[in-house]
Image (tube, rainbow, N blue to C red):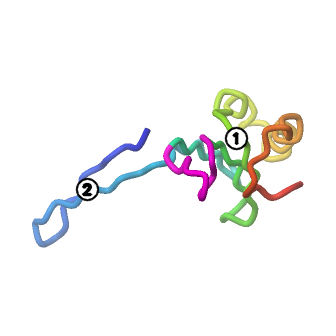
Amino acid sequence: MPTCHLMTLSSGVTVPLVQYNSVMNADGFYVSFNDYDTAPSLYGDVTTALVFGQMQAFYILNGDHRAGYAGLLSQGFDACLEYFKANIASINKRSERP
């Protein structure tokens, strides 16, 4: 579900900022959950992406995998990539392959 934050510019105008993804940050990577871009022309489903570095690689699974990744974040990227591989049957059409 998108979240909306309000930002007030130096001019005094308030601008809404909508964030569609929820993100769990870790050391050198992050996990991003997106339940907004589900149109067939986009991702086609709710997705959870394991993102390496500064968006150098996107490993995307269909469905909500936040709980599966949450316990692995402190173990590092390789542990999360093993989770991705164990759930490869749910790979998204836009995902990179390990």
Rendered position, 62 above or below 60: above
- The image position of residue 4, as x and y in percent, is 32, 47
Q: Is residue 17 left or right of residue 71?
A: left
Residue wearing tag 2: 16
Q: Secondary structure at mark 2?
A: strand
- The image position of residue 85, as x and y in percent, is 88, 41
Q: Nearer the viewer, residue 12 or 2?
A: 2
Q: Residues within 10 Å of mark 1 (few under 14, many from 20)?
A: many
Look at 70% across and 40% down and name the residue there.
62
Q: Residue pushed farthest front?
A: 40
Dividing the picture into quadrants, the one containing residue 91 is top right
- The image position of residue 97, as x and y in percent, is 86, 56
Look at 72% across and 36% down and name the residue there.
74
Look at 75% across and 54% down and name the residue there.
93
Distance between the alpha carbons at the discs numbered 2 and 1: 29 Å
Viewer-nearest of labels 2 and 1?
Answer: 1
Residue wearing tag 1: 62
Q: Is residue 17 left or right of residue 21?
A: left
- Three-letter code for the amino acid on which mark 2 is drawn: Pro
Task: Report the quarter where the N terminus lies.
Answer: top left
Instruction: Find the magenta span and give its range.
Output: 36-46
Dividing the picture into quadrants, the one containing residue 87 is top right
